[in-house]
Amino acid sequence: MFLKSLDIKNYKSLRNPGEIFFNLPDSVNEGSGLTILVGENNSGKSTIIGAPLKLKRNQIVNDEDKNG
């Protein structure tokens, strides 16, 4: 399974909504599928990596679920 893109809104340090696109491997070019996250400290790099893992474990609660 490959993650094609990720749309994060109002999660931890990522307050501005935005979609992040990941490179997909093409089985031809060596290194295809490699995505490198670069940014300043506290810019949300770890949040981008951690969000899908928490979703997989059902640890993120939707705002609508919180407010009932």
Image (cartoon, rainbow, N blue to C red):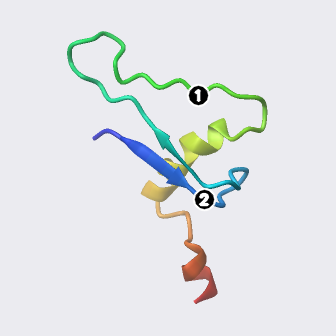
Residue 10 spot, x, y in % from top left: 66, 61
| The residue positioned farthest toward the top in the image shown | 30
Q: Element at badge 1?
A: loop
Q: Amino acid at mark 2?
A: Lys
Task: Give the vertical position of 10 relative to 46 (above or below).
Answer: below
Q: Give the residue displayed 64% in from the left and 38% down from the top.
A: 46
Which of the pair 3/54 is nearer the observer?
A: 3
The furthest residue to the right:
41
52 or 16: which is nearer to us? 16
Check the picture and name the quadrant holding the C terminus: bottom right
Looking at the picture, tell me which residue is in the foreground, 37 or 56: 37
Q: Position of residue 9 (x, y in %)?
A: 60, 59
Give the vertical position of 13 relative to 40 (above or below).
Answer: below
Residue at label 2? 9
Q: Residues within 10 Å of mark 1 (few under 14, many from 20)?
A: few
Q: Residues within 10 Å of mark 2 (few under 14, many from 20)?
A: few
Instruction: Look at 36% across and 41% down and name the residue there.
Output: 4
Q: Position of residue 6 (x, y in %)?
A: 47, 48
Left or right? Give the position of 31 relative to 21: left
Query: What quarter of the picture does the N terminus occupy?
Result: top left
Q: Quarter of the image holding residue 37?
A: top right
Residue at 37% of width from left, 41% of height from top? 3
Q: Amino acid at mark 1?
A: Leu
Q: Dot 2 lies on which element?
A: loop
The location of residue 56, given as percent across then percent down, is 43, 55
Q: Nearer the viewer, residue 62 or 53?
A: 62
- Mark 1 vs mark 2: which is more N-terminal? 2
Q: Return the residue at label 1.
A: 37
- Residue farthest to the bottom, as pictured: 68
